[in-house]
Image (spheres, helix red, strand yellow):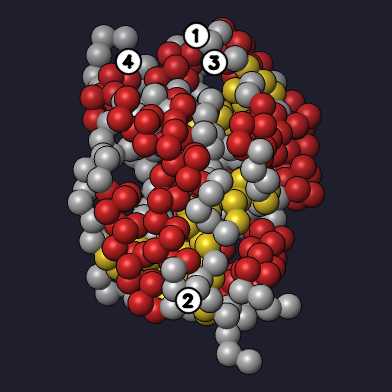
Protein backbone atom coordinates (compact mmCIF):
# COMPACT_ATOMS: atom_id res chain seq x y z
CA UNK A 1 0.00 0.00 0.00
CA UNK A 2 1.36 3.45 -0.85
CA UNK A 3 2.18 5.81 1.98
CA UNK A 4 -0.52 8.15 3.26
CA UNK A 5 0.25 11.63 1.91
CA UNK A 6 -0.40 14.43 4.44
CA UNK A 7 -0.04 18.21 4.14
CA UNK A 8 0.56 20.51 7.13
CA UNK A 9 -0.38 24.13 6.42
CA UNK A 10 -0.94 27.47 8.13
CA UNK A 11 2.29 27.99 10.09
CA UNK A 12 5.46 29.89 9.22
CA UNK A 13 7.11 26.53 8.65
CA UNK A 14 10.21 24.70 9.80
CA UNK A 15 12.84 24.81 11.14
CA UNK A 16 10.89 26.53 13.94
CA UNK A 17 11.69 30.21 14.33
CA UNK A 18 8.61 31.77 15.87
CA UNK A 19 6.04 30.14 18.14
CA UNK A 20 3.81 27.24 19.09
CA UNK A 21 2.51 26.18 15.69
CA UNK A 22 6.04 26.18 14.28
CA UNK A 23 7.19 24.04 17.20
CA UNK A 24 4.30 21.68 16.51
CA UNK A 25 5.31 21.35 12.86
CA UNK A 26 8.98 20.74 13.64
CA UNK A 27 8.27 18.12 16.30
CA UNK A 28 5.28 16.43 14.69
CA UNK A 29 6.21 16.17 11.01
CA UNK A 30 9.39 14.03 11.34
CA UNK A 31 7.63 11.73 13.79
CA UNK A 32 4.79 11.22 11.29
CA UNK A 33 7.40 10.29 8.67
CA UNK A 34 8.82 7.70 11.07
CA UNK A 35 5.30 6.32 11.43
CA UNK A 36 5.09 5.67 7.70
CA UNK A 37 3.39 8.84 6.40
CA UNK A 38 4.65 11.01 3.54
CA UNK A 39 4.54 14.54 4.97
CA UNK A 40 4.72 17.94 3.30
CA UNK A 41 4.99 21.14 5.36
CA UNK A 42 4.19 24.46 3.69
CA UNK A 43 6.60 27.21 4.75
CA UNK A 44 6.79 30.96 4.30
CA UNK A 45 9.74 32.04 2.20
CA UNK A 46 10.91 34.65 4.73
CA UNK A 47 11.42 32.06 7.48
CA UNK A 48 12.74 28.99 5.67
CA UNK A 49 16.03 29.25 3.74
CA UNK A 50 15.74 28.84 -0.03
CA UNK A 51 18.10 25.87 -0.09
CA UNK A 52 16.10 23.99 2.60
CA UNK A 53 13.73 21.66 0.76
CA UNK A 54 13.76 18.76 3.21
CA UNK A 55 13.84 18.41 7.00
CA UNK A 56 14.37 14.99 8.61
CA UNK A 57 12.48 13.25 5.82
CA UNK A 58 9.78 15.93 5.60
CA UNK A 59 9.26 17.66 2.26
CA UNK A 60 9.19 21.46 2.54
CA UNK A 61 7.39 23.73 0.09
CA UNK A 62 8.31 27.44 0.32
CA UNK A 63 5.76 29.98 -0.85
CA UNK A 64 5.71 33.79 -0.52
CA UNK A 65 3.34 36.03 1.38
CA UNK A 66 2.64 39.71 1.97
CA UNK A 67 4.51 40.46 5.18
CA UNK A 68 2.13 42.76 7.00
CA UNK A 69 0.33 42.15 10.29
CA UNK A 70 -3.05 41.28 8.79
CA UNK A 71 -2.10 39.82 5.39
CA UNK A 72 0.79 37.48 6.13
CA UNK A 73 -1.13 34.44 7.38
CA UNK A 74 -4.15 34.47 5.03
CA UNK A 75 -2.17 35.22 1.87
CA UNK A 76 0.34 32.45 2.49
CA UNK A 77 -2.31 29.94 3.56
CA UNK A 78 -4.39 30.69 0.47
CA UNK A 79 -1.39 30.07 -1.80
CA UNK A 80 -0.47 26.93 0.14
CA UNK A 81 -3.99 25.50 -0.09
CA UNK A 82 -4.14 26.15 -3.83
CA UNK A 83 -0.80 24.41 -4.30
CA UNK A 84 -1.87 21.51 -2.06
CA UNK A 85 -5.17 21.14 -3.91
CA UNK A 86 -3.21 20.46 -7.07
CA UNK A 87 -1.28 17.69 -5.32
CA UNK A 88 -4.38 15.89 -4.03
CA UNK A 89 -3.20 14.86 -0.57
CA UNK A 90 -4.94 12.10 1.36
CA UNK A 91 -5.45 14.36 4.42
CA UNK A 92 -4.42 17.79 5.66
CA UNK A 93 -3.84 19.66 8.90
CA UNK A 94 -4.56 23.38 8.99
CA UNK A 95 -3.39 25.37 12.02
CA UNK A 96 -4.72 28.74 13.23
CA UNK A 97 -8.46 29.31 13.48
CA UNK A 98 -8.26 32.22 11.03
CA UNK A 99 -7.43 29.69 8.30
CA UNK A 100 -10.78 27.89 8.61
CA UNK A 101 -12.07 29.72 5.54
CA UNK A 102 -9.52 27.87 3.37
CA UNK A 103 -10.58 24.35 4.36
CA UNK A 104 -12.99 23.98 1.40
CA UNK A 105 -10.12 24.57 -1.05
CA UNK A 106 -8.61 21.30 0.15
CA UNK A 107 -11.80 19.35 0.81
CA UNK A 108 -13.00 20.10 -2.73
CA UNK A 109 -10.25 17.78 -3.96
CA UNK A 110 -11.40 15.02 -1.61
CA UNK A 111 -8.84 15.64 1.12
CA UNK A 112 -10.35 15.61 4.63
CA UNK A 113 -9.12 18.56 6.70
CA UNK A 114 -8.39 18.77 10.43
CA UNK A 115 -8.16 22.29 11.88
CA UNK A 116 -6.17 23.07 15.04
CA UNK A 117 -7.74 26.26 16.40
CA UNK A 118 -5.21 26.91 19.20
CA UNK A 119 -6.73 29.31 21.79
CA UNK A 120 -9.48 31.93 21.62
CA UNK A 121 -7.60 34.21 19.29
CA UNK A 122 -10.14 37.04 19.23
CA UNK A 123 -9.28 37.78 22.88
CA UNK A 124 -5.73 38.84 22.04
CA UNK A 125 -5.23 42.56 22.56
CA UNK A 126 -2.89 42.82 19.56
CA UNK A 127 -5.91 42.61 17.27
CA UNK A 128 -7.95 45.70 16.58
CA UNK A 129 -11.68 45.65 15.76
CA UNK A 130 -11.07 44.21 12.29
CA UNK A 131 -8.85 41.41 13.59
CA UNK A 132 -11.29 40.48 16.36
CA UNK A 133 -14.16 40.44 13.89
CA UNK A 134 -12.22 38.14 11.57
CA UNK A 135 -11.46 35.72 14.40
CA UNK A 136 -15.06 35.80 15.64
CA UNK A 137 -16.20 34.80 12.15
CA UNK A 138 -13.42 32.21 11.95
CA UNK A 139 -14.72 30.49 15.09
CA UNK A 140 -18.06 29.96 13.37
CA UNK A 141 -16.39 28.72 10.20
CA UNK A 142 -14.14 26.41 12.24
CA UNK A 143 -17.10 24.39 13.48
CA UNK A 144 -18.67 24.14 10.01
CA UNK A 145 -16.01 23.82 7.30
CA UNK A 146 -13.24 21.38 8.38
CA UNK A 147 -13.76 17.64 8.64
CA UNK A 148 -12.43 17.58 12.20
CA UNK A 149 -11.73 20.19 14.87
CA UNK A 150 -8.69 19.96 17.15
CA UNK A 151 -8.27 21.73 20.50
CA UNK A 152 -5.00 21.71 22.41
CA UNK A 153 -6.63 21.91 25.86
CA UNK A 154 -9.80 20.72 27.59
CA UNK A 155 -10.60 24.36 28.36
CA UNK A 156 -10.71 25.15 24.63
CA UNK A 157 -12.71 22.01 23.92
CA UNK A 158 -15.27 23.09 26.52
CA UNK A 159 -15.45 26.57 24.99
CA UNK A 160 -16.38 25.26 21.52
CA UNK A 161 -18.78 22.72 22.99
CA UNK A 162 -20.62 25.25 25.14
CA UNK A 163 -20.62 28.14 22.66
CA UNK A 164 -21.19 26.25 19.39
CA UNK A 165 -22.20 22.75 20.49
CA UNK A 166 -19.22 21.54 18.47
CA UNK A 167 -17.15 18.55 19.53
CA UNK A 168 -13.38 18.71 19.11
CA UNK A 169 -10.49 16.31 19.57
CA UNK A 170 -8.04 17.32 22.31
CA UNK A 171 -4.40 16.87 21.33
CA UNK A 172 -1.98 18.95 23.39
CA UNK A 173 1.70 19.65 22.80
CA UNK A 174 4.58 17.49 23.93
CA UNK A 175 8.12 17.66 25.24
CA UNK A 176 11.14 15.48 24.55
CA UNK A 177 13.73 16.65 27.11
CA UNK A 178 17.31 16.62 25.82
CA UNK A 179 19.30 18.62 28.38
CA UNK A 180 22.52 20.31 27.35
CA UNK A 181 25.48 21.47 29.43
CA UNK A 182 26.18 25.21 29.71
CA UNK A 183 27.69 26.48 26.49
CA UNK A 184 27.70 29.40 24.08
CA UNK A 185 24.50 31.04 25.37
CA UNK A 186 25.74 30.90 28.97
CA UNK A 187 29.03 32.45 27.99
CA UNK A 188 27.37 35.16 25.91
CA UNK A 189 24.90 36.14 28.65
CA UNK A 190 27.22 35.58 31.62
CA UNK A 191 24.91 33.02 33.30
CA UNK A 192 25.49 30.39 35.97
CA UNK A 193 23.46 27.17 36.38
CA UNK A 194 20.40 27.54 38.64
CA UNK A 195 21.17 31.21 39.14
CA UNK A 196 18.72 32.88 36.75
CA UNK A 197 15.00 33.12 36.10
CA UNK A 198 13.70 32.44 32.61
CA UNK A 199 10.77 33.86 30.61
CA UNK A 200 10.07 32.61 27.06
CA UNK A 201 7.20 33.89 24.93
CA UNK A 202 6.28 36.19 22.07
CA UNK A 203 6.49 39.77 23.30
CA UNK A 204 2.80 40.56 22.95
CA UNK A 205 0.54 42.30 25.51
CA UNK A 206 -1.49 39.22 26.50
CA UNK A 207 1.76 37.38 27.29
CA UNK A 208 2.65 40.16 29.74
CA UNK A 209 6.41 40.51 29.27
CA UNK A 210 6.16 44.15 30.37
CA UNK A 211 4.49 43.14 33.64
CA UNK A 212 7.07 40.46 34.35
CA UNK A 213 9.82 43.05 33.96
CA UNK A 214 7.92 45.43 36.23
CA UNK A 215 7.39 42.77 38.90
CA UNK A 216 11.06 41.83 38.88
CA UNK A 217 12.04 45.32 40.05
CA UNK A 218 10.65 44.40 43.49
CA UNK A 219 12.82 41.26 43.72
CA UNK A 220 16.04 41.48 45.69
CA UNK A 221 19.45 40.08 44.92
CA UNK A 222 21.47 40.03 41.73
CA UNK A 223 20.12 36.99 39.84
CA UNK A 224 19.39 37.74 36.18
CA UNK A 225 15.97 37.49 34.57
CA UNK A 226 16.43 36.24 31.00
CA UNK A 227 13.58 37.47 28.78
CA UNK A 228 13.65 35.36 25.60
CA UNK A 229 11.37 36.47 22.82
CA UNK A 230 10.31 39.05 20.29
CA UNK A 231 7.41 39.68 17.92
CA UNK A 232 6.92 41.11 14.46
CA UNK A 233 4.67 44.16 14.14
CA UNK A 234 5.06 45.08 17.86
CA UNK A 235 8.11 47.34 17.88
CA UNK A 236 6.51 50.17 19.87
CA UNK A 237 5.17 47.86 22.56
CA UNK A 238 8.52 46.07 22.91
CA UNK A 239 10.47 49.31 23.08
CA UNK A 240 8.30 50.37 26.02
CA UNK A 241 9.88 47.80 28.35
CA UNK A 242 13.20 46.89 26.69
CA UNK A 243 14.52 50.34 25.80
CA UNK A 244 16.99 52.34 27.85
CA UNK A 245 15.23 54.36 30.52
CA UNK A 246 15.93 55.79 33.92
CA UNK A 247 14.12 52.94 35.71
CA UNK A 248 15.57 50.06 33.66
CA UNK A 249 16.94 47.07 35.59
CA UNK A 250 20.41 45.86 34.60
CA UNK A 251 19.57 42.37 35.88
CA UNK A 252 16.97 41.92 33.11
CA UNK A 253 18.52 40.52 29.91
CA UNK A 254 16.92 40.64 26.45
CA UNK A 255 18.81 38.24 24.16
CA UNK A 256 16.02 38.14 21.55
CA UNK A 257 14.39 34.96 20.22
CA UNK A 258 16.46 31.81 20.81
CA UNK A 259 15.76 28.41 19.26
CA UNK A 260 17.33 24.99 19.01
CA UNK A 261 20.29 24.12 21.20
CA UNK A 262 20.48 27.59 22.75
CA UNK A 263 16.88 27.32 23.91
CA UNK A 264 17.49 23.83 25.31
CA UNK A 265 20.58 25.10 27.09
CA UNK A 266 18.56 27.77 28.88
CA UNK A 267 15.75 25.34 29.78
CA UNK A 268 18.27 22.88 31.18
CA UNK A 269 19.65 25.13 33.92
CA UNK A 270 17.10 27.79 34.97
CA UNK A 271 16.25 28.21 38.64
CA UNK A 272 12.60 28.81 37.71
CA UNK A 273 10.50 29.55 34.64
CA UNK A 274 7.88 32.33 34.56
CA UNK A 275 4.74 31.74 32.46
CA UNK A 276 2.67 34.93 32.31
CA UNK A 277 0.27 34.21 29.41
CA UNK A 278 -3.42 34.92 29.85
CA UNK A 279 -4.85 33.92 26.44
CA UNK A 280 -4.55 30.62 24.60
CA UNK A 281 -4.77 26.92 25.24
CA UNK A 282 -1.78 24.72 26.06
CA UNK A 283 1.39 26.80 25.75
CA UNK A 284 4.34 24.80 24.38
CA UNK A 285 6.89 26.82 26.37
CA UNK A 286 5.21 25.85 29.65
CA UNK A 287 5.11 22.17 28.70
CA UNK A 288 8.78 22.32 27.70
CA UNK A 289 9.83 24.10 30.88
CA UNK A 290 8.10 21.42 32.95
CA UNK A 291 9.66 18.61 30.93
CA UNK A 292 13.12 20.02 31.55
CA UNK A 293 12.50 20.01 35.31
CA UNK A 294 11.99 23.71 35.85
CA UNK A 295 10.06 25.11 38.77
CA UNK A 296 7.19 26.85 36.96
CA UNK A 297 5.75 30.12 38.28
CA UNK A 298 2.47 30.41 36.42
CA UNK A 299 -0.21 33.02 35.80
CA UNK A 300 -3.41 31.61 37.30
CA UNK A 301 -5.67 30.90 34.31
CA UNK A 302 -7.76 27.77 33.71
CA UNK A 303 -5.61 26.82 30.72
CA UNK A 304 -2.35 27.14 32.65
CA UNK A 305 -3.76 25.23 35.63
CA UNK A 306 -4.80 22.44 33.30
CA UNK A 307 -1.17 22.05 32.20
CA UNK A 308 0.77 22.68 35.42
CA UNK A 309 -1.72 21.29 37.95
CA UNK A 310 -0.31 20.84 41.44
CA UNK A 311 3.24 21.23 40.10
CA UNK A 312 2.71 24.94 39.41
CA UNK A 313 3.27 27.90 41.73
CA UNK A 314 0.59 30.44 40.86
CA UNK A 315 0.35 34.22 40.75
CA UNK A 316 -2.15 36.70 39.35
CA UNK A 317 -0.83 39.00 36.68
CA UNK A 318 -3.34 41.65 37.79
CA UNK A 319 -1.58 41.64 41.19
CA UNK A 320 2.10 41.96 40.38
CA UNK A 321 3.08 41.63 44.03
CA UNK A 322 2.08 37.95 43.87
CA UNK A 323 4.62 37.38 41.08
CA UNK A 324 7.34 39.33 42.89
CA UNK A 325 6.69 37.29 46.05
CA UNK A 326 6.88 33.95 44.20
CA UNK A 327 10.16 34.88 42.51
CA UNK A 328 11.62 36.17 45.79
CA UNK A 329 10.63 32.94 47.53
CA UNK A 330 12.70 30.79 45.18
CA UNK A 331 15.57 33.26 45.03
CA UNK A 332 15.92 32.78 48.78
CA UNK A 333 15.20 29.03 48.73
CA UNK A 334 16.66 27.43 45.57
CA UNK A 335 16.25 23.95 47.06
CA UNK A 336 12.49 24.46 47.05
CA UNK A 337 12.68 25.46 43.38
CA UNK A 338 14.47 22.21 42.55
CA UNK A 339 11.82 20.23 44.42
CA UNK A 340 9.01 21.93 42.48
CA UNK A 341 10.94 21.37 39.26
CA UNK A 342 11.18 17.65 39.89
CA UNK A 343 7.43 17.58 40.46
CA UNK A 344 6.86 19.42 37.18
CA UNK A 345 9.07 16.99 35.28
CA UNK A 346 7.12 14.01 36.62
CA UNK A 347 3.83 15.57 35.56
CA UNK A 348 5.13 16.39 32.08
CA UNK A 349 6.46 12.87 31.69
CA UNK A 350 3.05 11.41 32.51
CA UNK A 351 0.92 13.78 30.44
CA UNK A 352 2.94 15.38 27.63
CA UNK A 353 4.97 13.32 25.17
CA UNK A 354 5.69 14.08 21.51
CA UNK A 355 5.56 10.36 20.81
CA UNK A 356 1.97 10.13 22.02
CA UNK A 357 1.06 13.38 20.22
CA UNK A 358 2.40 11.94 16.96
CA UNK A 359 0.51 8.70 17.55
CA UNK A 360 -2.72 10.65 17.99
CA UNK A 361 -2.23 12.67 14.83
CA UNK A 362 -1.19 9.64 12.77
CA UNK A 363 -4.29 7.78 13.95
CA UNK A 364 -6.47 10.79 13.13
CA UNK A 365 -5.06 11.14 9.60
CA UNK A 366 -5.61 7.46 8.91
CA UNK A 367 -9.17 7.68 10.18
CA UNK A 368 -9.87 10.76 8.07
CA UNK A 369 -8.43 9.09 4.98
CA UNK A 370 -10.46 5.94 5.63
CA UNK A 371 -7.49 3.70 6.40
CA UNK A 372 -7.13 1.42 9.40
Mark 2 or mark 4: whose residue is earlier in sequence:
2
Quarter containing the C terminus: bottom right
What separation in Å lies between label 1 and label 3 (alpha carbons)? 14 Å
Mark 3 or mark 2: whose residue is earlier in sequence:
2
What separation in Å lies between label 1 and label 2 (alpha carbons)? 55 Å
The vertical placement of 16 against 326, above or below, is: below
Q: Is residue 204 left or right of residue 308?
A: left
Badge 4 marks a residue whose secondary structure is loop
Query: Which mark, residue 291?
Result: none
Say which residue label 1 marks. 218
- Residue 62 spot, x, y in % from top left: 30, 68
Contact, CB < 8 Å: mark 1 with mark 2?
A: no
Say which residue label 2 marks. 89
Say which residue label 3 marks. 317
Q: Is residue 313 left or right of residue 37?
A: right
What separation in Å lies between label 4 and label 1 (alpha carbons)? 12 Å
Say which residue label 4 marks. 248
- Residue 357 spot, x, y in % from top left: 66, 59
- Tell me if residue 68 can be seen: yes
Point out the frontmost of discs 3 and 2.
Answer: 2
Badge 1 marks a residue whose secondary structure is loop
Mark 3 or mark 4: whose residue is earlier in sequence:
4
User: Badge 2: how crowded within 10 Å, few (<14), some, or many (20+)?
Assistant: many
The vertical placement of 230 against 128, above or below, is: below
Q: Is residue 199 left or right of residue 32?
A: left
The residue drawn where x is 32% and y is 49% is 73
Q: Is residue 270 left or right of residue 109?
A: right
Point out the frontmost of discs 1 and 2.
Answer: 2
User: Badge 3: how crowded within 10 Å, few (<14), some, or many (20+)?
Assistant: many
Badge 2 marks a residue whose secondary structure is loop
The residue drawn where x is 59% and y is 19% is 327
Amino acid sequence: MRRLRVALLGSRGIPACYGGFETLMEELAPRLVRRGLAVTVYCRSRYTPRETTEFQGVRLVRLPSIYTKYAETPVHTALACLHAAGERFDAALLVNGANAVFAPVLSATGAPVALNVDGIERQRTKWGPVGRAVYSLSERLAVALPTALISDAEVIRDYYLERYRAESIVIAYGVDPRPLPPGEIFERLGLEPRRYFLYVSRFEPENNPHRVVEAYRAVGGDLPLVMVGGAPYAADFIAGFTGDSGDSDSRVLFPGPIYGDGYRELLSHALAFIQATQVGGTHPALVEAMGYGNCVIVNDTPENREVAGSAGVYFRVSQLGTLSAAVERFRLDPAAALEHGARAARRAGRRYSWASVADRYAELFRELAGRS
